[in-house]
Amino acid sequence: MNLNVSVKTVTSIVGIICLALYFLGVYWSFEPEKLDIRQEVIDAAKTENVSPVVGYTTTTALIRVTETILNKPGGYLANDALPPSVFLDNIPAWEFGALEMIRDMALVMRQEFSRSQSQSVENAQLKIAQPQLNIDHTSWAMPSAENEYQKAIDALYIYRKQLTDVNSQDAQFYARADNLRDWLQEVTKRMGSYSQRLSASVGREQLNTDLAGDDVASQSTYANQQQQVKTSWWQIDNEFYEARGASWVLLHFLKAIEIDFNDVLAKKNAKVSLQQIIRELEASQEAIWSPMILNGDGFGILANHSLVMANYISRANAALIDLNDLLSQG
């Protein structure tokens, strides 16, 4: 009798724990809300008692999106080794996509935005921040990914403070068309990759265009002229959330760029082009009402969320390429 009671008690406790972990996992799987970059800048400037200067908004956007990854419900999940986060894959994929876009921005800030020319000296704080963001996103100890990313954030805070110091020349942010083009080129490569991977949710035959446009081009090893391209069924939702995380971060960066590069965009009559890209990315962040990412076949009965996301990203990427070309014109 006592044994039966003990078994029922243990079973009930285990059931309650599993149920609690399930709902906790669901809660941690919610994506962060979009940030109001303008308000973030106002709040930050008020806290630091400074007046925003060129570069302040972009640096603030980089800081805040990185902090969001670390401080959202559940914290940073990609390197967790305990339940329920060890069983989650959508949000860790979202985090990785967001982190990849953050890494691109940090690199361009270090090499382009903060330097007047190729022979100029690197900013000391960006020299610290950029490598810290490249720590393996799954590392959980020695070093811990969260600790390294926090070090990068701390260095970015110092850089942002330096930008507003009129008595110091230690930090600069150069809002020039050529600098902006360098970043856009990195972004278009990233977004083009996401578009292709999302489109591959539906298997298709694809012609090999690797050497197209150059009659003397060559490559290391032979590649078939036709290739079967298809994303694994097990990876479809991961690809979707990775692209969604990258788009979320890019949306905030573009809103910051609109402010810091206002004069450059106005001179090129390119503000409306940037605003259209922002609209496409905002559409990619609409709520997902399905309990799971569906992978319908072509014009079949079920929806294909990957193709919908690919459509928004492709349109945004095409507009980014057009914007880049517009900035290159005199």
Image (tube, rainbow, N blue to C red):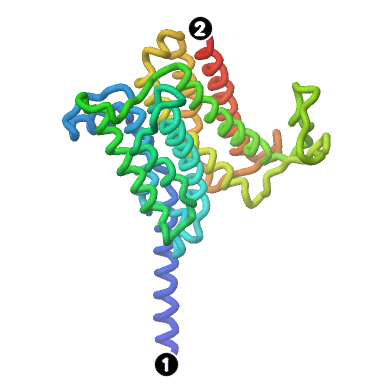
Front position in the image: 138 or 328: 328
- Quick one: SS at disc 1? loop
- Quick one: SS at disc 2? loop
| Residue at the far left in the pictured view | 49
| Earlier residue among tags 1 and 2 | 1
Q: Are marks 1 and 2 in contact (CB under 8 Å)?
A: no
Q: Residue at x 60, y 31 (%)?
A: 192
Q: Is residue 324 visible?
A: yes
Does 118 sit above or below residue 295?
A: above
* Residue for badge 2: 330
Q: Quadrant of the N terminus?
A: bottom left
Q: Residue at x 36, y 50 (%)?
A: 73
| Residue at the far front in the pictured view | 119
Q: Position of residue 22 (x, y in %)?
A: 44, 60
Q: What's under tag 1, amino acid-wise?
A: Met
Q: Residue at x 30, y 35 (%)?
A: 159
Q: Position of residue 129 (x, y in %)?
A: 38, 42
Q: Position of residue 302 (x, y in %)?
A: 65, 40
Front position in the image: 295 or 98: 98
25 sits to left or right of 236: left
- Residue 301 lies in quadrant: top right
63 sits to left or right of 296: left
In this rendering, the label closer to the viewer, 1 or 2: 2
Q: What's under tag 2, amino acid-wise?
A: Gly
| Residue at the far bottom in the pictured view | 1
Q: How busy is the neighbourhood of tag 2: few (under 14 within 10 Å), some, or many (20 plus)?
A: few
Q: How many marks?
A: 2
| Disc 1/disc 2 C-alpha distance (Å) | 88 Å
Q: Residue at x 19, y 34 (%)?
A: 48
Front position in the image: 213 or 313: 213
Does 116 sit above or below residue 127?
A: above
Which of the labelled discs sits on residue 1, or is there none? 1
